[in-house]
Image (cartoon, rainbow, N blue to C red):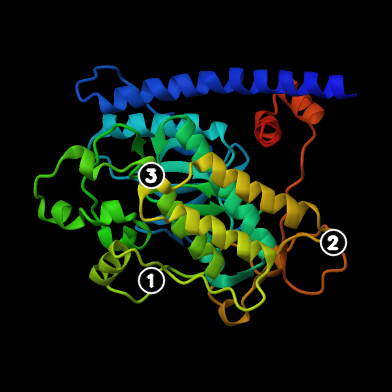
Amino acid sequence: MNERLDEDKKENKTIKFTSLNRVIDSIFLLNKQVNEQNSAIVVKAKEIKASELKDPLKYVPPRQGSRVKIQKKVYNALEVACKPISVDDIQKTQKHLAILEKLDACPYIIKFHGLSEISTEKVMVFEWAELGTLKNVYKNYKIDWEAKISIARDICRGLAFLQSVKILHHDIRCENVLINENIQPKLTNFKFAREFHANTTQIDDINALIHWLAPEKLSHISAEQDKKPKKADDCRYTIQCEIFSFGMLLWELAFQKIPYDGMSMLDVQKYVLKGKRETLNFGLSPHPIQREFGEIIKLAWQQDPSLRPGIQLLFNKLQESYEKNVLSNKGSPLIRPLKENTTEITTGDADLDSLCLSDSEDQNESVIQIVVPLIPVKEGLQAHKEGNHKKAWECFEANAN
């Protein structure tokens, strides 16, 4: 039995890295071309014919995104989100979108299907996330701690994958995480995403980002805003900056509100540069997950970048908490509608009843269950052989840790 398990694990790791290496190599190549200003190689994202985008059976009013309105369509029998795009530098944009296509090897990053048109307007076609952003979810639902640790762990998985292909997101916050009908998080909004060594560009809307920015970036905001010359290395966005922002996202998820809410940009900047942070007040008798969440947050938002842990350590801690508090319990994590906000839920064509999973017949209130099964190694190997790469990835990625 043990010998067979060892063989399974050995085969599992070989398949994992063999399949992913091809994806990683292609992403590296695209990244290099994106950051070479004079690259003559033409790279284009997939084009989807306008006629291939169908209207859903039930009309869904456009969903308001952060800056544009998003339309729901059906593509190849899949529900998709069509987001308008303004193309100033079409080739530069095409290369970034081509990278997005490759990133769908990770199930925790929103899938990009390609470019299309709706009424002559150019749109990006992404997979549809029924519940909208994680910010939308926490503003309208009470999220159980078991669900929070599962969501946090999967966001961490997405960030770990990005780091494995040398890409940083640059804008980590709950508004840039989408949630599908299975309560699975998907990283989105890669407007600022660049490779590790790419030059940092000026941040356009600092007010939207400042609550999650690391102190080393905050110290250069005035210089960036005033366009004063600074050393490139001093202003560079690093892995440590990303870790800090992830810590702030965890705080945002934990307390279901924007960090430093109500404080001005200048006040936030001064507060964080002095080494001060949001409070971690979980009450007199905190839930075990709350204590563990707090410890992870404090590790991630340390003032000295060199003291912040790597993404692997953070994932290990989140996974340990998940195994202790979710897998070991019989019940499923829940998210419950906030009664005072039920009229504000913006989840496409879904109402409260349609958000309930029908697995349990004894449910007596509107809830959403989240079930994240642990897939055996043998099942993952079989999924790989059958071409079910998403299931195989989830199994191999989980069992390799």
Instruction: Please name the residue shown 51% across and 42% down the image.
Output: 311
Q: State which mark lies toward you, 3 or 1.
A: 3
Taking the spot 68% from the left edge, 53% from the top edge, the residue there is 321
Disc marking residue 306: 3
| Spatial CA span between label 3 and label 2 | 47 Å
Numbered circle sitting on residue 260: 1
In the image, taking residue 143 as reference, residue 374 lies left or right, namely right
Instruction: Pick the residue in front: 306 or 210.
Output: 306
Sequence-wise, which precedes: disc 3 or disc 2? 3
- Give yes or no for contact between labels 3 and 1 (Cβ–Cβ under 8 Å): no
Task: Pinpoint residue 157: horizontal percent, then vertical percent.
Answer: 57, 42
Residue type marked 2:
Ser
**x then y, percent, for residue 32:** 32, 23
Q: Determine which quarter of the picture holds residue 39.
A: top left
Secondary structure of residue under mark 1 = loop
- Residue 220 placement, left or right of 346: left
Q: Residues within 10 Å of mark 2 (few under 14, many from 20)?
A: few
**Looking at this rendering, what residue extends furthest in the right direction?**
1
Crowding near pointer 1: few (<14 within 10 Å), some, many (20+)? some
Q: Is residue 293 left or right of residue 387?
A: left
Query: Which quadrant does the C terminus fall into?
Result: top right
Specify the amino acid type for callout 3. Ser
